[in-house]
Amino acid sequence: MLEIERRGFIRTEERGPGKVPEIILRDESLRGVDYKLPYLQAIEEGAAGSTSYFRVPETFWSSGLCTDLSGAGLAMYLIAMSRAGWGNDPSFWLSPTLFRKEYGLGESTRKKGLKELVDRGVLTHELRSIDRNGESGHRRFVRSVYTIVSDYRAAGATEPLPPSPKEQPTLEELLTFFHAHSKES
């Protein structure tokens, strides 16, 4: 524990003679501030509706889905939640050509995970005939559209926003930090 504290991941506060010290988790940015729950930090900053975190519904845990899903199923559930688990429209589609670029996962992961979620009743799947303008009368094509079943959607979740680069340490900052601290041990 002393090593973790020395590296800046936690700090301890004495509570008094004979009492166990309080262990306080530090922010993972390694900038010396205490960790705050994301939604509490968003409330403090007045940006509660713009946080990129969402609450996974209780059904995910209580139904046993959390232990039954494969890695591909879990990855696709989290992607589905980020796409349609919030707001008014529970439906989404994923561009096969952009999937790897957006999420860094392969085509087999996408297919296996989506099939698993449909088979378990978490998502429904339908083929929709649409056109690029959302109207009829133009060239039409078929799109696979998935809908998250209401029990597996998060109530009150919000659209994710990309993290601000100013708030995140750069790779160079992290490497410098770890390099400096690894020499001490």
Image (cartoon, rainbow, N blue to C red):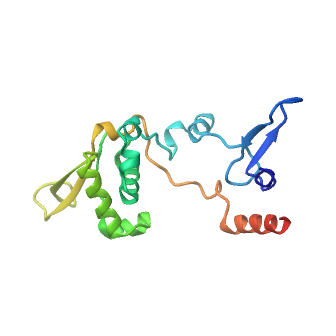
Most extreme residue toward the left is: 137
Vertical placement of 43 versus 98: above or below?
A: above
Most extreme residue toward the front is: 18
The reply to whether residue 93 is in sight is no
165 lies left or right of 3 = left
Most extreme residue toward the right is: 17
Q: Position of residue 150 (x, y in %)?
A: 29, 37
Q: Nearer the viewer, residue 168 or 126?
A: 126
35 lies left or right of 144 = right
| Residue pictured at 87% horizontal, 30% vertical | 18
| Residue pictured at 68% horizontal, 54% vertical | 29
Q: Position of residue 23 (x, y in %)?
A: 75, 40
| Residue pictured at 78% horizontal, 44% vertical | 11
| Residue pictured at 16% horizontal, 57% vertical | 130
Vertical placement of 4 versus 174: above or below?
A: above
The reply to whether residue 41 is in sight is yes
How many tags in the picture? 0
6 lies left or right of 48 = right
Q: Quadrant of residue 131?
A: bottom left
